[in-house]
């Protein structure tokens, strides 16, 4: 990179951009990494991404949404960090489970190798065995095609999770220090994201926290090429000069990542400040930046609001439903409306006359997302009932499909006490049952996971039209329970029709309620494949129905 402009695609040598973070977590490393990927892609390069998570878990599958945010699911069934969702949405790529590296995965790999005798009797240590395993893993997955072609990527953006200085991330920092010599220093760029807080009555931007985190990073053997400074307001010239002087970077390589009107402006903001020049790439090889700017402008130009009631159990942390939020935002862009999500804690609807009911009744549409556990289930069932009986547009995702089915069995079929066996093992009328092949003893990686086909059962219906008339669609799954096959005919005869089923014709994937403007449930998670310029059809249908455009 330092010897002139990157060669045009395809490159002879893989290029890497490593994004690390300092001072505190949650600064937006994932969005920064994704935005840099957009710039690389705009230069005509094939781009892929890797996320390193220093925790000991094998993957994100068993982690609480309250602690870790949503679990993002990939085509191959990988349960991964939500940042991989950012990469896929920004870069329009499809990643694999191995693109999310964890300490648990690395140590398992090393221990398996030791058990096989691969180390020829040597003492197995963090250096070199763990660090070598990290480097080999990165090199391997970076070469895997991710854009739907069979072409090897030209560039790989690597995000190091956590904060520099954490004990957990130390082996990965050392691995990346060695990696720069393994691939050649000219083939790797280090980008460090840090916080510049504002203090005092005059709002002075303080650079000392960033100076300290860069000093620590350099002490570990990595010198940042670029600083991306998070702040509420644009970085001042004084702060930029001070950071450049004390952090051993050019003033042109100190980027201000201040608050913007919408997330699509982040790549544009970095490009305007010269990130393309610093990376020595031409960001105008394709028309991607032009399309990105139009998308950002469109997001800002919408003034008329559409209210969607989100009825869930993790409403205290929006990251728990990050992809659902993105799916709604993508659809709202398409219908030209400013999205307002009215968050409703499902358990509050179980109290008559709770203020949450006023919020629900004033919404233009209702969405019940996926989830686990029985807390708030009756509130979700009540929300589905309200949408069904009042002709309010409704989208149920995974659990949202299941609670709507339970509600229908109770109140239309008259099956009193109908429930899911997940919540009531002794229900007299099981509307939702445990899938027979799923393990009841192991939680990690044992659900119905990943991309599976859904075949439409009817020639014409709302969902098939929204999917462009396709005979089948591939969407990502994550569930252990399903609609009871023994009740399907009875349910359909009463008007709730399962218009999409799996390849066996037994598992119910999509339902539509006859005579309702938009009452749809999907067993899969359409949010995982939604893109800013290609919104997921179930979300698009909900927003079209909520705005009278369906």
Image (cartoon, grey):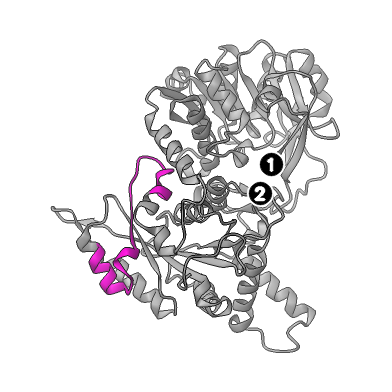
Q: How crowded is mark 2: few (under 14 residues within 10 Å), some or many (20 or more)?
A: many
Kindly identify which numbered label has been placed on residue 476: 1
Kindly identify which numbered label has been placed on residue 37: none
Which tag, 2 or 1, sits closer to the chain's start? 2
On the rendered structure, is 472 left or right of 23?
A: right
User: Magenta part of the protein: which range?
Assistant: 240-268
Q: Can residue 229 be seen in this view?
A: yes
Picture quadrant of residue 475: top right
Queried whether the magenta region covers residue 112, the answer comes back as no
Vertical relation: 357 (above or below) 137 = above
Q: Nearer the viewer, residue 327 or 428?
A: 327
Queried whether the magenta region covers residue 247, the answer comes back as yes
User: Where does residue 505 sit, x and y in percent of width and height?
Assistant: 84, 30
Kindly identify which numbered label has been placed on residue 74: 2
Helix, strand or loop for disc 1: strand
Question: Marks 1 and 2: in contact by CB < 8 Å?
Answer: yes
């Amino acid at each position: 990179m330092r010897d002139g402009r990157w060669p045009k695609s395809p490159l002879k040598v893989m290029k890497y951009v490593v994004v690390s973070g300092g001072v505190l977590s949650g600064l937006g490393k994932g969005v920064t990494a994704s935005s840099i990927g957009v710039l690389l892609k705009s230069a005509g390069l094939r781009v892929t991404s890797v996320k390193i998570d220093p925790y000991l878990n094998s993957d994100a599958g068993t982690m609480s949404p309250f602690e870790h945010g949503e679990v993002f699911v990939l085509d191959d069934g990988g349960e991964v960090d939500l940042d991989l969702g950012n990469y896929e949405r920004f870069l329009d790529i499809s990643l694999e489970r191995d693109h999310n590296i964890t300490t648990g995965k690395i140590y398992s790999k090393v221990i398996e190798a030791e058990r096989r005798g691969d180390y020829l009797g040597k003492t197995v240590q963090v250096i070199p065995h763990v660090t070598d395993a990290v480097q080999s893993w990165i090199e391997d997955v970076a070469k895997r095609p991710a854009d739907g072609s069979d072409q090897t990527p030209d560039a790989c953006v690597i995000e190091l999770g956590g904060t520099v200085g954490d004990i957990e991330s130390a082996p990965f920092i050392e691995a990346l220090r060695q990696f720069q010599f393994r691939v050649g220093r000219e083939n790797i760029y280090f980008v460090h994201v840090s916080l510049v807080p504002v203090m005092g009555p005059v709002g002075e931007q303080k650079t000392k926290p960033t100076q300290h985190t860069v000093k620590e990073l350099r002490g570990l053997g990595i010198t940042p090429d670029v600083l991306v400074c998070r702040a509420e307001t644009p970085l001042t010239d004084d702060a930029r000069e001070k950071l450049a002087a004390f952090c051993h970077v050019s003033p042109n390589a100190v980027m201000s990542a201040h608050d913007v009107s919408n997330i699509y402006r982040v790549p544009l903001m970095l490009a305007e400040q010269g990130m393309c020049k610093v990376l020595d790439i031409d960001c105008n090889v394709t028309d991607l930046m032009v399309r990105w700017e139009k998308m950002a402008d469109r997001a800002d130009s919408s003034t008329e609001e559409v209210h969607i009631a989100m009825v869930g159990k993790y409403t205290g942390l929006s990251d728990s439903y990050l992809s659902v939020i993105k799916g709604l935002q993508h659809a709202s862009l398409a219908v030209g409306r400013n999205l307002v999500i009215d968050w409703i804690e499902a358990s509050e609807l179980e109290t008559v006359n709770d203020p949450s009911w006023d919020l629900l009744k004033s919404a233009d549409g209702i969405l019940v997302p996926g989830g686990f556990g029985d807390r708030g289930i009756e509130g979700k069932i009540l929300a589905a009932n309200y949408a069904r009986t009042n002709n309010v547009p409704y989208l149920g995702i995974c659990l949202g499909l299941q609670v709507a089915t339970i509600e229908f069995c109770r109140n239309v079929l008259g099956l009193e006490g109908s429930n899911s066996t997940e919540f009531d093992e002794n229900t007299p009328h099981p509307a939702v049952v445990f899938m027979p092949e799923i393990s009841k003893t192991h939680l990690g990686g044992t659900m119905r996971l990943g991309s599976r086909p859904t075949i439409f059962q009817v020639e014409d219906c709302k969902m098939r039209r929204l999917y462009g008339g396709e005979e089948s669609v591939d969407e990502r799954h994550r569930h252990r329970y399903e609609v009871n096959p023994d009740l399907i005919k009875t349910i359909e005869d009463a008007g709730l029709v399962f218009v999409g089923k799996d390849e066996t014709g037994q598992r119910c994937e999509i339902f539509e309620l006859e005579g309702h403007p938009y009452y749809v449930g999907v067993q899969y998670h359409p949010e995982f494949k939604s893109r800013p310029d290609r919104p997921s059809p179930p979300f698009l249908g909900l927003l079209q129905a909520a705005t009278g455009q369906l």
